Image: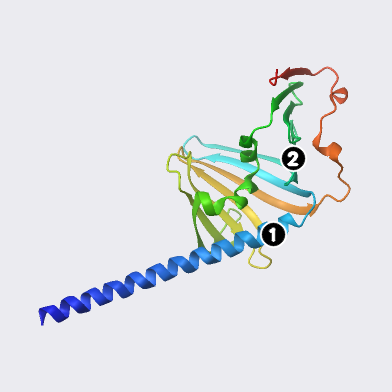
Amino acid sequence: MMKRLLLLSASLWLAAFSLQAQALADAQRKAAAMIDHFSAKLKKINIPRIDFEYTIESRQDDLKETMTGTLYLKLKQKKMRVEMPDQLIVADGRHVWVIQKELKEITKDAYSPEINQMNPLNLLNEYREKFLYAFMGRQEGPDGKTWDLVELTPNDKSADFFKIKLFFSPKNGMLRFFQIFDKAGVIYTFEIQSLQNAHNATNQLFSVDLNKYSGYSVTDLTK
């Protein structure tokens, strides 16, 4: 009798484990499908123009700062342009220019892979290798509305953050919100307010003409 009970208990445990593993696999497949769907749409756009709102929030420090801007990308050429009210950042594939408008200062530095961290959409190309990912169902987003939620946990436990949330539209699968939760209790929220193709953009968009910045001090860190 005892032997039968042990066998039954083991069978139930294995069945429960199998169901749990299947549920996790399904959650991973759904998450990957959603990320890949949006990534494929983004790659079809020659020069994506993204109007965004960026919020930094720390409840411990009673801090909440919000800024708006526009992000232009040339993904294959590793080029990027970020326009904000007081700052302009341009990566031309060889150098990175940071222009502080209020301070009238320009910094030029060599391009490095770390610049990709400034582009929150960069993880769309590396999430399979660097994260555990799962679809968490439909949940409330930062705006109080319901979105399809994908959560990512970094494999590198020494990373400064412990979780990323991606909120996708249930209607068209477009990414709307991107949140990073760091270990210091700060939440970084990137909201994609619009995504379109910058049809009229030229290569000049990803370059800096110093003649346009008369009176600015220039610091060249490449020398």
Please state which amino acid type lies under the numbered disc 2: Lys
User: Hey, which quadrant is residue 63 in on the image?
Assistant: top right
Give the number of callouts. Answer: 2
> Which is nearer the N-term, disc 1 or disc 2?
1
Quadrant hosting residue 204: top right
119 over 132 or under it: above or below: above
Element under disc 2: strand
Residue 164, position as x, y percentages in the image: 53, 50
The quadrant of the picture occupied by the C terminus is top right
Q: What residue lies at 56% left-to-right and 61% top-to-bottom?
A: 32
Q: Quadrant of the N terminus?
A: bottom left
Residue in the image at 83% along x and 49% along y: 198
Percent x, y for residue 115?
A: 65, 36
Q: Residues within 10 Å of mark 1 (few under 14, many from 20)?
A: few
The relative height of residue 135 versus residue 161 in the rendered view (above or below) is: below
Q: Is residue 134 above or below residue 179?
A: below
Residue 195 falls left or right of residue 36:
right
Going 72% across and 19% down the picture, which residue do you hit?
220
Residue 180 higher or lower than 106, as above or below: below
Nearest the viewer among 29 and 180 is: 29
Which secondary structure, mark 1?
helix
In the image, taking residue 84 as reference, residue 188 lies left or right, namely: left
Amino acid type at circle 1 is Ala
Q: How is the image coloured?
A: rainbow
Residue 100 point in image, percent of width and height: 73, 26
- Name the residue tied to disc 2: 79
Query: Circle 1 sits on which residue?
Result: 40
| Residue at 76% from the left image edge and 18% from the top image edge | 218
The percent position of residue 119, horizontal first and vertical second, equals 65, 43
Is residue 110 left or right of 165 when viewed as pictured?
Answer: right
